Amino acid sequence: MSLRIEERRELNLRMFYLTPLLAVVLTVVAGFLMFLSMGYDPFLGIYHFFVSPLLTVYGLAELGLKAAPLIMIAVGLAIGFRANVWNIGAEGQLTIGAVAGGGLALALIDVEAFWVLPLISIAGILGGMAWAAIPAFLKARWDVNEILTSLMLTYVATLTLSALVFGPWKDPMGFNFPQSEMLSESATLPLVLEGTRLHAGVVVALLIAAAGWVVMTRTIIGFQIRVVGQAPAAAAFAGFSRKRLIWLSLLTSGGLAGLAGLFEVAGPIGQLIPSISPGYGFTAIIVAFLGRLHPIGIIGAGLIMALSYIGGENAQVEAGMPQAVTGVFQGMLLFFLLASDFLARYRLRFDSGGNAADLRKEAPAE
Amino acid sequence: MSDPLILGFITVISAATPLLLAALGELVVERSGVLNLGVEGMMLAGAVAGFAITTTTGSATLGIIGAMVAGMAMAFAFGVLTLTLMANQVATGLALTIFGIGLSSLAGAGFVGIAVVPLPKLDIPGISTLPVVGPLLFSHDILIYASIALTVGVAWFLKRSRAGMILRAVGESDISAHSIGYDVIRVRYKAVLFGGLTSGLAGAFLSLSYTPMWIEEMTAGRGWIALALVVFATWRPLRVLFGAYLFGGVTILQLSAQGAGWFDVPSQVMSMLPYIATILVLTIISAGPWRARLNAPACLGKPFRPPT
């Protein structure tokens, strides 16, 4: 008897949508074993990580708070990933969005007006777009690898923010801490749930996911993106412009990442500090894949990855586990997802040697 | 030649070595047609394993072996996913980096703040005491010598050896290599494991020699710079050596400029230089008349499944 791998003629759709769940289950199982090997009570570990954060209103609000930036960024990244444009520097675009919008908010710190928040949001989007425009230009003009340029720019962005809050933007009354003044009331996102930190950004994130769904499924440009990704030759034959898609996907994902960064500053943080994101820009890459590059799937995936952050914090407080467990879970989840995708694309067959019935069945196919 | 200048060159060699080690391995991986973006993750695994084993056993030799094994274990996971299960190489490489950052932080949590005796300098009797060339060329630790030996070894392997020729064939045309009887997947597994080994060594160099301690995410993007170096070198080992030393030079130059306060700019602006230099170099290579892309292995990043 031997094992044979057969490519499926068509992607197995049921498998395609089931494998993310399988990946989550495998991650929990692996987490169980990891807790066991680290000397923690595995049941308690799993409980603190995946269950207890969901049992309070505050925990659920934190879930939405952390899912919002992940969803916003991942919806943008998914567009590029479908068109084979690999923006992995969303973390940098997020940072520059926060710098641009937050900087404007600091300049308008004495202004009390309804238009401040929309204005700084636009500045955040433009900041992110400008940062993503660099790899877009280099890719479209000279085919410079966007993976490496967008990633390198992330380090430059983080250092830029650091230079500003350690230098000219440091709060003169801040006891020399590297942080800006607190933003004004007009530059702060309204809360949607009193008593928690859940702000209006979560509503915006859901609207963006809905808009992403409409664009990808109902518009010509969405169709072009899917064709370029799946059949580049056909796309070239149909005259779809590859350069336009490079610009489109990088500017969209950059703008959304910038907005997510500004929302962190105008939301839970309330000021500029050296580090405004716990790696949302990188985690959003996993969210995009886990959500099957589909806006609706991304909402679910964003919530799961948000749980990995909150669970990590919770396990740290409740069980004294290192915060790094979060990163391990996130990495494992993507590994298991990529591995189990195999089941959606291929079929496993067990051949039992020279079985007559098998031979007859196989015969017409030869 | 004055002493500070010699000292400066020695620090350049130190800064260049992790880049050189990691880029050499990735070069072999890419010449076999596989793109592994997980260099940063494999380096971190090597750095933490090397440090943890050296401090607990007291043996740097065991630490270096452990770092190689850790890098190879990470590379093996990458191989299973991309070569056996034919997963997307870009996504898998990113997963490897994210996983490596998390795992190394977790494993290294108990080792933060501990110091280790740096790798000993291996003086070569007789010539290490020569003026200028002695300290410059013949008084380094084992990993620096190893990086130079590996450069020559990889260059020879790819250009002159039979196995190297097969590896290049697999990277240029997997179907043809398969049809004349070579096991494409097997060759690629070996290449990927070699990449893990050198990345592990690069990590060990960071945590045992360059800054002899463990700091979370201490690679600081060097894995990605190594990936860029392979493109910069247009997939040639000796040019990787040149590129790594160039980048080592940029790193040390900006560090000394920061230290001496040569320019009236915030230290962060100087720290940006290696990253900006990487972008500039990639652009020049891609835009220039060298047609770097024509040198890229034809099957780079494409999954291969033997036709049945």
Image: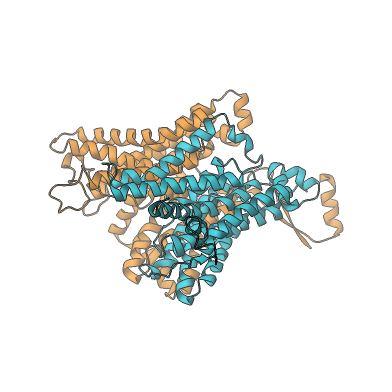
Query: Which one is in front, B49 or B144?
Result: B144
Tell me which corner region of the image, top left, top right, bottom left or bottom right, holds residue A311: bottom left
Going by the image, does A154 lie left or right of A291? left
Tell me which corner region of the image, top left, top right, bottom left or bottom right, holds residue A321: bottom left
Chain drawn orange, letter?
A: A
Going by the image, does B244 lie left or right of A126? right
Q: Is residue A291 visible?
A: no
Q: Residue at x 49, y 67 (%)?
A: B50
Q: Where residue B115 appears, x then y in whole percent? A: 38, 69
- Its colouring scheme is by chain
Q: Where residue B226 appears, x then y in whole percent? A: 51, 48
Q: Residue at x 63, y 24 (%)?
A: A237
Q: Is residue B176 visible?
A: yes
Vertical placement of A17 versus A106: above or below?
Answer: below
Q: Residue furthest top?
A: A239
Q: Residue at x 44, y 50 (%)?
A: B221
Query: Which one is in front, A60 or B258?
Result: B258
Chain drawn cyan, letter?
A: B
Q: Where residue A229 appears, x then y in whole percent? A: 57, 36
Q: In the rendered picture of this protein, how many numbered marks are placed on residues? A: 0
Q: Where residue B278 appears, x then y in whole percent? A: 46, 41
Going by the image, does B85 lie left or right of A318? right
